[in-house]
Image: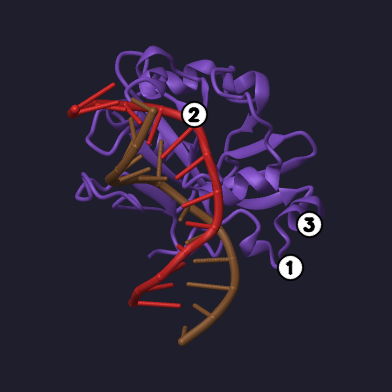
Chain colours: A purple, B brown, C red
Amino acid sequence: MPLDREFFAAPALEVARRLIGVTLAYGDCAGEIVETEAYSGDEASHFVTRRHTGALMGDTYASVYVYSIYGMHRCLNFTADRSGPGAVLIRALRPVRGIDAMRQRRGVTHDHQVASGPAKLVVALDLPDGLTGRDVTDVFRLEPPTEAHDIESGPRIGISKARDLPWRFHVRGSPFVSRRR
DNA sequence: TGGCCGATATGCT
DNA sequence: GCATATCGGCCAA
């Protein structure tokens, strides 16, 4: 049974934690989510720093939110929280299906470099423009974990504000997570 | 309308 | 470890 919209109605922190171990499928490709970050109304959140485009975080849950950064990268989020601003950034996947195609699009040889970063996974999955605002469950298929994972949390990566909040989650010891700076 | 900044990735030292 | 590519979104003016 795939996850439904209501999975995303919970606060972003809870959704971020619960997405670890979920298998994300798009087209012929799929990967297990091994790293996420939660954003809500905090100072690092696009709800604050991109008030117009980030309004989606307050207006919706279970919507796709893709943003671009540094002119050349795009990152995938799912909005969350039915009663407040929330989104979860998908930061890394362990490739599961369509691995050859993903390797080729990324121009890498090893599985652990295919989707070990938020912008990398967008390239690996070959996500098109125009997904923002679409219903998550219409675009992706999300299968819940079959096993429990050892989940570690820590500060979010690449932000200058609210660095103290431990809102990043990842599978402890996984070689498929993004590398810390 | 211009200038600044960023939830990044990569390649070089 | 550090520079840098490259541009959308934001706000001040």
The quadrant where residue A128 appears? top right
x and y, in percent, of residue A2 in the image: 64, 25
Q: What chain does mark 3 sit on?
A: A
Tally the marks.
Answer: 3
Point out the image quarter for the N terminus of chain A.
top right
Foreground mark, 2 or 3? 3
Q: Of callouts 1 and 2, which one flags the residue occurring earlier in the amino acid sequence?
A: 2
The residue pinned by badge 3 equals: A104
Q: Residue at x 30, y 29 (%)?
A: A40
- In this picture, is A21 found above or below A59? below
Q: Nearer the viewer, residue A63 or A5?
A: A63
Q: Is residue B13 above or below residue A151?
A: below
Marks 3 and 2: in contact by CB < 8 Å? Answer: no
- Is residue A92 visible in the rendered image? The answer is no
- Near mark 3 (Cα within 10 A), the count class, few <14, some 14-19 or many ≥20, is few
User: Would you place residue A135 above or below residue A72 in this image?
Assistant: above
Residue B1: quarter of image: top left
Q: Earlier in the sequence, mark 1 or mark 3?
A: 3
Element under label 3?
helix
Could you tell me which residue is drawn at 35 percent across and 17 percent down?
A: A58
Residue identifier under label 2: A78
Q: Secondary structure at mark 2?
A: strand
Quadrant of the rendered structure where residue A60 is?
top left
Q: Which amino acid lies under the numbered mark 1 shown in the image of this protein?
A: Thr
- The residue under label 2 is which amino acid type? Phe
| Chain label for disc 2 | A
For residue A51, side relative to residue A135 (left or right)? left
Reading the image, the residue beneath label 1 is A109
Is A142 left or right of A87, judged from the image as shown? right
Q: Label 1 to label 3, Cα distance in Å? A: 8 Å
